[in-house]
Image: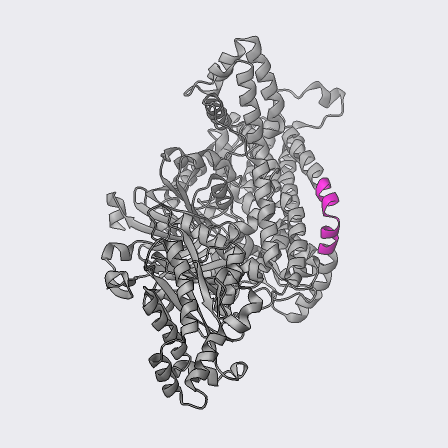
């Protein structure tokens, strides 16, 4: 499958970002690096631009634009490409109506300068081609949503006409999911991975609807340096008929239980290190552990973006001074730095 | 109980004498107490209980272990190296317990002046470390032999022929100089002890500070793991025992090492065969020097060496032989330990930016160079020398006992060194004149009274700190060795008002464990430790190693990032929380604890003995 406007995610590379958006390009990079990413395909920015031109969005208000996008069906050519992409997922999943996640992949999103985290639409547990079609248009429409518009207005770098790619991936039926940073987001310590985890789909953690379990794990020894049990009162699970999502209460026993064990934490740290190495910088990673008949459940990376606001870590007084000078400093001698 | 001076801790002048302990001051020098004439300055300072070195009340003689180290430490730090912000450490005794307080230098001009001296003098040591340290080892071995060889004259009815026909001195002359010589050896030991210690710790502390600035989450144990020596002298005694255990099996003499037999019985069983006798000869070769390993921290007269209490090495031999026969591997995994230490260093270095990495690597190199001293001085000084020194003092005690000045040679430790000198003077005099001595009437009641005092004082629990809360702790030794940081002081201050059922300390070895507590405040109580218990103690020493195979976790009152409890716990993979300040005071034997060695939190879950419930 490689239509005019669609490409398998696994074929994309960083250089494809201007055409497919940062999210799709990153996922492509990661699958090429053999990092476990759910299979799927990407819709290009041009698919949106063509649709926008067909609809004559130029010069129309944000509200009118999103209404128009939602109302108009996709062009036959694009719909055919979408059909072909979805058929491949049908084959891969062995399911006639496999659930997929449809995610926005905006251009200029998730760069080191800016993150559009949460501004753009994501649809989960979407089943059947008709629903995929609709979800794609919802993503496009969110480009004109009030939050995205005002966020863009504050960003000089995002100047120019807005445009967006879309990523469509097989849905991971997550028992546990969450986010992790490849450094300590508070102290900036590069030797630890900070992990937040909660039951069910990652939505609850990403949207800040639960206080998750928190872990800090050493990259060097995989020791858990600190853990804090969160209340995790609710979780997102597949909705009725395994379509869409439902927000449900978590039972008291599962609230009190840690949702990750040492082995899973170690796998997460390994994943964090591989992703960090691949991109050569600190990453903010969404992940999920699949409900598998086989134990342990498979770990998937859902998305990764550069850590945008790196904490300003004070430069160690050690920089560029000889060991003896530094020791003299410890003893308060020879112009040494103050001990912290 | 708040300090009258308005600080966070009780005033040292507000501490009451426990009932029945009136007059405890007689055991100590006049300069050792909180005297009204020094009240104004003493009350304004912070004094903290040095429970790391002095967990129980001081017998009068053992004050040599307070005076000598503090003048050696002070002279090196303040007068020889001139560490810019820190002079020496003052001490005071309260109800038999030793409290210490550093003397800071605060005048910036004086600090700058001292920095000049320090830079030149410390620089010389760092630049010539290996050579100077090699020399140090030779000096210490010679000193250890010197103190062992001091001859205590016999005071026989008639002087030996050599006094008349040769050039031997009168025994009365020799007796006093032999005792002076013994004391001088102790002063020499402490001089040697502190010659390198400051600089060794300083290099380590600098490395530790750099790590924490660049890697704020790094656990202390990873820092010490990167620096710690793999093949240091302290591990040799047990390595020799493992070798002897293998040898016993190869030689077919292992059956002699039956559990429950005393060392004498084992020796007798071995002596019955040719192979056994050959094994015993090999043991003799190992003993000097490796049986100079201590059975506890060497600062009290009752801690001896393996020579004095061979039950400890024999118990290890039995354990090693049993393990070998069960097919277990008893070797210390030195290759794995070394590989892990290098792996940690490489991985952390790779995570740093280029500037920090260069400093990290250079400081790690320096720390590794100086660290063998930090670990090995314990063997040469605290174990080998101390056990020989106290045994020499026992010889003087035996002489005094033979002349009925005291009842038993051990009683000599109830007299101060000045009093021992006085007693020896009277003994010399009356031995020479043939007159009658007052000593036999004078000393025994003093000895008896002091034994009673010490027993009662031991039941008193000293507060962790007295006096005023300082704004800063500027003495590097105080931070390094005792773990006394402003944060730790705040915790101590909070825990004074009961503090609830949580204690916090430094996370020293990771892992979580629940179990019953065993509070150990004296070496004797160590024998009560049962398998599965959590050891709660003031501080451990490496000589306690055998009990680490029984316990499930360690909690200590005092201990910084260098404490032995931390190092040994990590080797045994046991959770450890050190430096809680008050664990032995707030926890009772039998209470259930939850110890989290990763966060440094100890929770008291509940008491299953009445004693605990009453607290």
Q: Can residue B468 be seen in this snapshot?
A: no
- Is B388 displayed left or right of A150 in the figure? right
Tell me the quarter of the picture where residue B514 sits: top left
B237 vs B488: above or below: above
* Residue located 26% across and 63% down the image: A239
What residue occupies the far top of the structure in this picture?
A: B273
Q: How is the image coloured?
A: one colour
| Image position, residue A58 (x, y; %) | 46, 88
Q: Is residue B267 visible?
A: yes
Residue A319 shown left or right of residue A163 in the figure: right
**B350 with respect to B296 (left or right):** right
Q: Count all numbered tags in the image, as a single digit.
A: 0
The front one of B590 and B435 is B590
| Residue B338 screen position, x and y as percent | 60, 41
Magenta-drawn stretch contains B125: yes
Main secondary structure type of the part rendered in magenta: helix
Instruction: Give residue A3's position: percent from left, percent from top.
Output: 49, 67
* Rendering quarter of residue B258: top left
Q: Residue at x 41, y 65 (%)?
A: A168
Question: Residue A196 versus residue A34: which sits nearer the camera?
Answer: A34
Q: Position of residue A127 (x, y in %)?
A: 32, 64
The segment highlighted magenta reads: B122-135
Looking at the image, residue A293 lies above or below residue A284: above
């Amino acid at each position: 499958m490689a239509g005019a406007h669609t490409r398998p995610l696994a074929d994309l590379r960083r250089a494809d970002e201007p055409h497919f958006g940062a999210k799709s390009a990153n996922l492509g990079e990661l699958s090429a690096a053999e990092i476990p990413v759910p299979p799927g395909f990407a819709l290009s920015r041009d698919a949106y631009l063509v649709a926008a031109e067909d609809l004559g969005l130029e010069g129309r208000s944000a509200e009118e634009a999103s209404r128009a996008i939602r109302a108009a069906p996709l062009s036959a050519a694009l719909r055919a490409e979408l059909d072909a992409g979805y058929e491949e997922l049908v084959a891969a999943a062995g399911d006639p109506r496999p659930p997929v996640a449809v995610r926005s992949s905006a251009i200029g999103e998730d760069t080191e300068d800016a993150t559009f985290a949460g501004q753009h639409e994501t649809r989960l547990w979407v089943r059947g081609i008709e629903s995929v079609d609709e979800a794609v248009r919802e993503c496009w429409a969110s480009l004109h949503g009030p939050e995205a518009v005002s966020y863009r207005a504050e960003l000089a770098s995002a100047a120019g006409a807005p445009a967006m790619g879309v990523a469509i991936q097989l849905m991971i039926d997550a028992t546990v999911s969450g986010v992790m940073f490849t450094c300590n987001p508070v102290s900036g310590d590069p030797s630890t991975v900070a992990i937040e985890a909660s039951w069910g789909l990652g939505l609850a953690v990403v949207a800040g609807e639960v206080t998750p379990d928190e872990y800090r794990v050493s990259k060097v020894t995989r020791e858990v340096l600190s853990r804090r049990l969160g209340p995790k009162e609710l979780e997102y699970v597949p909705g009725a008929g395994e379509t869409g999502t439902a927000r449900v209460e978590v039972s008291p026993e599962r609230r009190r239980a840690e949702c990750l064990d040492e082995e899973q934490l170690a796998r997460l740290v390994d994943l964090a290190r591989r992703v960090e190495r691949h991109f050569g910088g600190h990453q903010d990673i969404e992940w999920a552990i699949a409900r598998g008949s086989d134990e342990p459940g498979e770990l998937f990376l859902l998305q990764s973006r550069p850590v945008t606001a790196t904490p300003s870590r004070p430069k160690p007084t050690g920089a560029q001074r000889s060991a003896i000078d530094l020791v003299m400093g410890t003893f308060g001698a020879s112009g040494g730095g103050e001990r912290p | 109980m708040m300090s009258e001076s308005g600080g966070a801790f009780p005033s040292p002048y507000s501490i009451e004498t426990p009932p029945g302990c009136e007059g405890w001051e007689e055991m100590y020098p006049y300069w050792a107490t909180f005297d009204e004439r020094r009240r104004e300055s003493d009350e304004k300072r912070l004094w903290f209980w040095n429970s790391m070195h002095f967990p129980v009340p001081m017998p009068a003689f053992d004050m040599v272990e307070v005076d000598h180290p503090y003048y050696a430490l002070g002279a090196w730090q303040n007068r020889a190296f001139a560490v810019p912000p820190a002079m020496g450490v003052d001490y005071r005794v309260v109800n038999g317990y030793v409290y210490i307080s550093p003397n800071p230098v605060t005048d910036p001009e004086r600090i700058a002046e001292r920095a000049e001296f320090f830079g030149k003098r410390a620089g010389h040591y760092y630049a010539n470390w290996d050579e100077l340290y090699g020399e140090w080892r030779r000096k210490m071995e010679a000193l250890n032999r010197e103190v062992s060889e001091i001859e205590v004259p016999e005071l026989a009815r008639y002087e030996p022929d050599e006094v008349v026909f040769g050039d031997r001195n009168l025994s009365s002359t020799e007796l006093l100089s032999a005792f002076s010589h013994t004391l001088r050896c102790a002063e020499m030991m402490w001089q040697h002890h502190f010659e390198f210690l400051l600089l060794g710790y300083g290099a380590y502390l600098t490395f530790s500070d750099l790590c924490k600035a660049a890697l704020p989450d790094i656990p202390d144990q990873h820092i010490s793991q990167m620096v710690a020596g793999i093949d240091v002298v302290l591990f040799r005694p047990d390595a020799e025992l493992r070798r002897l255990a293998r040898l016993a099996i190869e030689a077919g003499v292992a059956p002699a090492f039956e559990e429950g037999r005393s060392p004498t019985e084992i020796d007798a069983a071995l002596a019955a065969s040719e192979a056994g006798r050959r094994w015993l000869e090999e043991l003799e070769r190992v003993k000097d020097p490796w049986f100079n390993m201590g059975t506890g921290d060497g600062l009290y007269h009752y801690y001896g060496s393996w020579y004095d209490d061979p039950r400890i090495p024999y118990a290890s031999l039995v354990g090693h032989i049993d393990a070998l026969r069960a097919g277990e591997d008893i070797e210390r995994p030195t290759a794995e330990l070394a590989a892990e230490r290098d792996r940690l260093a490489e991985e952390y270095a790779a995570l740093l930016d280029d500037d920090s990495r260069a400093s990290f690597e250079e400081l790690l190199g320096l720390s590794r160079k100086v660290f063998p001293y930090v670990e090995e001085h314990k063997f040469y000084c605290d174990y080998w020398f101390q056990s020989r020194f106290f045994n020499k003092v026992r010889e003087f005690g035996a002489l005094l006992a033979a002349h009925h000045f005291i009842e038993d040679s051990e009683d000599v430790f109830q007299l101060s060194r000045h009093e021992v000198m006085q007693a020896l003077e009277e003994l010399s005099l009356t031995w020479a004149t043939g007159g009658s001595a007052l000593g036999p009437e004078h000393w025994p009641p003093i000895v008896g009274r002091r034994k009673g005092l010490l027993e009662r004082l031991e039941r008193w629990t000293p507060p962790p700190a007295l006096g005023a809360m300082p704004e800063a702790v500027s003495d590097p030794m105080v931070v390094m060795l005792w773990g006394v940081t402003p944060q730790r002081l705040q915790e101590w201050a909070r825990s004074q008002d009961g503090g609830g059922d949580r204690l916090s300390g430094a996370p020293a070895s990771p892992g979580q464990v629940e179990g019953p507590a065993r509070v150990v405040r004296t070496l004797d109580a160590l024998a009560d430790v049962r398998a599965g218990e959590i050891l709660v103690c003031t501080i451990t020493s490496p000589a306690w190693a055998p009990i680490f195979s029984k316990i499930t976790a360690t909690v200590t009152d005092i201990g910084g990032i260098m404490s032995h409890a931390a190092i040994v716990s990590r080797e045994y993979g046991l959770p450890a929380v050190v430096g809680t300040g008050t664990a032995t005071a707030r926890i009772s034997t039998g209470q259930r604890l939850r110890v989290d060695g990763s966060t440094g939190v100890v929770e008291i879950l509940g008491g299953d003995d009445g004693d605990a419930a009453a607290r």
